[in-house]
Amino acid sequence: MRSLKTARLKWVALMFCALALTGSYGCTEVDETDPPPVYLPQTSEDNVLNNFQVAYREREISEYAKLLASDFQFYFDPATRGQLGIEFWTRTTDSLQTEQLFNSTDVTKITIDLTWTPKSAQGAGYVQPREGWTKLFLTDVFLDVDVQPSGSPVTTYRVEDQTQRFFFRRGRTYPPSGPSDTLMYIVEWRDDGTGATSISSLKAD
């Protein structure tokens, strides 16, 4: 998405072009390309969610997998649980399914925008294994997956107005593998979505 700053730069460039018709001003084309994706240090819940979105947009499975703890679990919404007959996916299954989504030649674009209050992570409990976890609630999710099989028009699968719960922990393993294992990881992702199209239904499709 183009930023307001980019739009203003474009407007200024157009003004200079107009002046060039009546004066001696030059006209230089403005580069409107989107800035390169930025992965932040994996040191906070907010940074992890930023990287989560970038990995989805860029469809980079290695970057996505970096964010998941070794015992990560994705919990389906209630409706999808009933359809599949299972409650959650492990890290291995979730990563493989996400890789299929990212690498699919039929998927032409993924747009994602997660909404949460920065620095709002809270303690997630004091009983094992959650005594070292934090939790963060996403108040809204917007996700578009554009699918276009060969010779067919584009179909957009949209998820919006959905809430999610993310649980985090420092250390990829429990207990941490060593003093250097201090990065922040997603240890649980719980889909609270409802309706015909949810995160769960897209992941399981």
Image: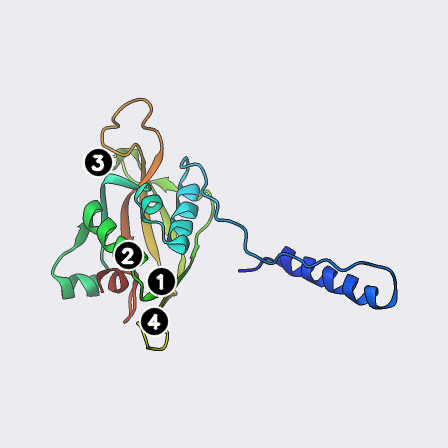
Which of disc 1 and disc 3 is earlier in sequence? 3
Q: Amino acid at mark 3?
A: Pro
Q: Quadrant of the C terminus?
A: bottom left
| Label 1 Cα crowd, 10 Å radius (few <14 / some 14-19 / many 20+) | many
Which of disc 2 and disc 1 is earlier in sequence? 1
Which of disc 4 and disc 2 is earlier in sequence? 4
Does residue 180 show up?
yes
Per the image, the residue denoted by label 4 is: 148
CA–CA distance in space, label 1 to label 2: 8 Å
Task: Determine whether, in the image, residue 142 is placed left or right of residue 103.
Answer: right
CA–CA distance in space, label 3 to label 2: 20 Å
Assign a secondary structure to mark 2: strand
Q: Residue at x 32, y 77 (%)?
A: 151
Per the image, the residue denoted by label 3 is: 129
CA–CA distance in space, label 3 to label 1: 27 Å
Assign a secondary structure to mark 1: loop
Task: Determine whether, in the image, residue 24 is placed left or right of residue 6.
Answer: right
The numbered disc on residue 191 is 2
The numbered disc on residue 3 is none
Does 149 appear above or below 189?
below
User: In front: mark 3 or mark 2?
Assistant: 2
The numbered disc on residue 162 is 1
Give the image location of residue 184, x and y in percent.
35, 36
Q: Residue at x 28, y 38 (%)?
A: 125
Q: Residue at x 23, y 55 (%)?
A: 97
Does 48 appear above or below 163?
above
